[in-house]
Amino acid sequence: MQARELGKSGEPIAVIGQGTWALELADEGEARRALHAGLELGLTHVDTAEMYGAGRVEERLGRILAGRRDEVFLASKVLPSNASRAGTLAACERSLRRLGTDHLDLYLLHWPGSHPLAETIAAFEELRRKGSIRHYGVSNFDERELAEAVRLAGPGRIACNQVLYHPGERAVEHAVLPACARLGVTLVAYSPFGSGKFPPPSSKGGRVLAEIAARLGATPRQVALAYLVRDEHVDAIPKSARAEHVRENAGALRVTLDSADVARIGEAFPLGAKPRTLPTI
Ligand code: NAP
């Protein structure tokens, strides 16, 4: 399955998308080939942020996605330090200009900050009315912060909560994922490969992923992604600036784990106790 509903919006979003953190460091031609390969394979949710490369990633995406904007579900994020009402409106305008588009499909508050959340949400609503954004959501919110966001925005308005989630970091399963399911909010798993620290084959977890992958004719990374998106409320946004990696990641959409696989992965990557604060990167 390539897509599932975004929050309660009634609109589909890609189950596997494409992250862009640090994309400014890659060769632009390679990054273009990777992102385009992803679009052709259904990885249409492209996630960025004003923070990435201090705006250079958005500018690069503007060039890479020119002429293909209609194929993309484009998400960006406002920095908490900019997330006052006026600051959010201005930040969105800057992102739109850098991205060379007149609207974002999704706009997120990057993490909870000191501006009152009600102000940020009021700005998101205004941007929606103007047509500058189609949906909005949050990122790095724990279950309590998410419930407050839903209370302030009203039911069905917060489309997603983008949080750290990979086999080696499952803390969101304690309370954030259940809250997302209860509140009708999509959980977008960021750093699904541990942000460059994917379990090596020599580790216990790496061995389990490799064994399951071999049985299914898949790769360990495909098994890791399939593990995360097995829950109907979860999508994932692996980042890759290499077309062959993007093709591998897209192949996870064809991988289905059975309950024994899920249990083995869960044992190899224990959930652990609920941490006091939500892990982030
Ligand atoms: P990630 O997706 O877990 O891992 C990216 C790393 O994995 C890159 O080094 C990439 O290298 C490599 N990789 C990807 N596919 C591969 C494959 N098939 N084979 C081998 N290597 C592969 O890390 P991430 O970038 O931290 O997280 C993903 C996205 O989530 C970010 O890009 C960003 O959009 C978002 N994010 C959001 C937050 C937040 O606070 N909201 C925080 C962190 C990340 P290559 O490029 O060479 O393939």
Image (cartoon, grey):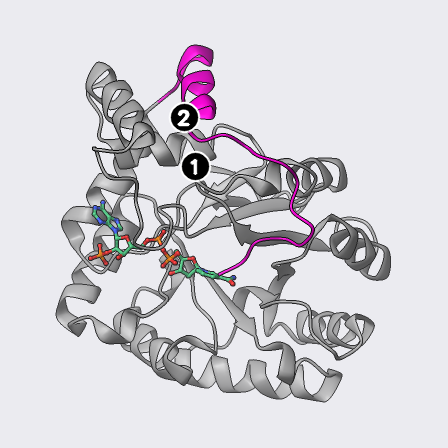
Q: In this view, does 228 lie above or below 119?
A: above
Residue 119 rendering spot, x and y as whole percentages: 79, 77
The amino acid type, in three-letter code, at marker 2 is: Ala
Magenta residues, as a range? 256-281
In the figure, is residue 75 to the left or right of 23? right
196 relative to 232 in the view: left or right: left
Main secondary structure type of the part rendered in magenta: loop
**Nearest to N terminus: mark 2 or mark 1:** 1
Give the foreground label among 2 and 1.
Answer: 2
Q: 11 or 7, which is in the foreground?
A: 7
Residue sitting at x 30%, y 54%: 196
Residue 64 place in picture, x, y as percent: 26, 71
Q: Is mark 1 on a helix, strand or loop?
A: loop
What amino acid is found at the position of numbered circle 1 in the picture? Pro
Percent position (x, y) of residue 198? 30, 44
Which image quarter: residue 257?
A: top left
Label 2's element? helix
Q: What x and y, as percent, mark residue 227?
A: 42, 29
**Contact (Cβ within 8 Å) of mark 2 with mark 1:** yes
Residue pointed to by mark 2: 268
Q: Verify whether residue 35 appears in magenta.
A: no
Labelled disc at residue 30: none
Residue at screen point 67% across, 45% down: 185
Identified at 47% across, 17% down, the residue is 263
Q: Residues under labels 2 and 1: Cα distance?
A: 9 Å
Q: Ligand 1 quadrant?
A: bottom left
